[in-house]
Amino acid sequence: MNPRALPFIALILGACAIGFVPNLVRLADTGPAAAGFWRMALALPILLPMMLRDGRGATLRPSNASLLAGLFFAGDLAFWHYGIGYTSVANATVLANLSPVVVTAVAWFAFRERPGRIFLAGLALALAGAWTMAAGAGAGRPGALLGDMLSVTTAFWYALYFIAMRQARQGEGASRAMFWSSLVTAPVMLVVALAMGESIMPASTVGWLACVGLAVAHVAGQGSIAWALGRLPASIASVVVLAQPVVAAIVAFFLFREILTPLQMVGGLVTLIGVVVAQRAPVAAVPLQRAQ
């Protein structure tokens, strides 16, 4: 069996789970940053027993990389959740997932993961499909341009999160890295929510269910991605999760009647083709040293 097969499947499942997130943020009747706080806070009780299961998860000092991942993820959530409120779900998710450009550049120089021509071709297809899928999705929405700009900024935070989480995964398990990073993200999101004067508590049953759904999606989605990052080059992993916009757009259609045009549907198909091409590409990588 191809050693990349299982991590690749985990990445796809993780991307599908995260694809529900922007729609759940819309359903959570709190502020955007407050939704991010509940996503982290409600995930911690799930992550704690998973971390303790390895027998030493709570006794070891968290790595600097996992703590940095938490800070970067807070930046990702703050910008993305606000972007979701202004532009369409498809736009916000596609633009936030343009991080492969940043991830590949950083991985190339920092980790000597040299992308080959096949990978670059897959990346080009995925990005072209993603842009096509987003074309016109936010047209007519008040503040759509602002939402698009916030979502693009999210891509930089998400790229930094990818790099930090990959570094953390060289010396600790996925559940441990997820727990400590989430523990950092939660209070940062609460501070942002309070500073922005947001409503913190969900005011309805649907709102609470959406917040619980965000936590479950975080554990299942980011947990799968974090696990796979310990087994795949960061550049390939970041392209695979471009499947998120496809799932997000499909869910948004059923929940909010955000209709995709035929051109956007073609863009989604091209994105998936690019993901498959990039996943099959060899990347010359020099392994990182495991933390002592």
Image (cartoon, rainbow, N blue to C red):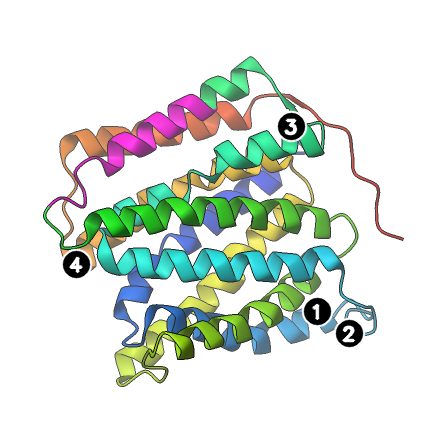
The residue identified by callout 4 is: 256
The residue identified by callout 2 is: 58
Location of residue 253 in the rendering, given as x and y in whole percent from the top left corner: 18, 51
The residue identified by callout 3 is: 108
Q: CA distance from mark 4 to mark 1?
A: 37 Å
Disc 1 or 3, which lies upstream in sequence? Answer: 1
Quadrant occupied by the N terminus: top right
The residue identified by callout 1 is: 51
The kind of residue on which mark 1 rests is Met
The kind of residue on which mark 3 rests is Trp
Residue at image point 44% right, 72% down: 192
Closest to the observer: 136 or 290? Answer: 136
Q: CA distance from mark 2 to mark 4?
A: 42 Å
Residue at image point 13% right, 44% down: 139
Q: Secondary structure at mark 3?
A: helix
Which of the 4 quarters of the picture holds residue 254?
A: bottom left
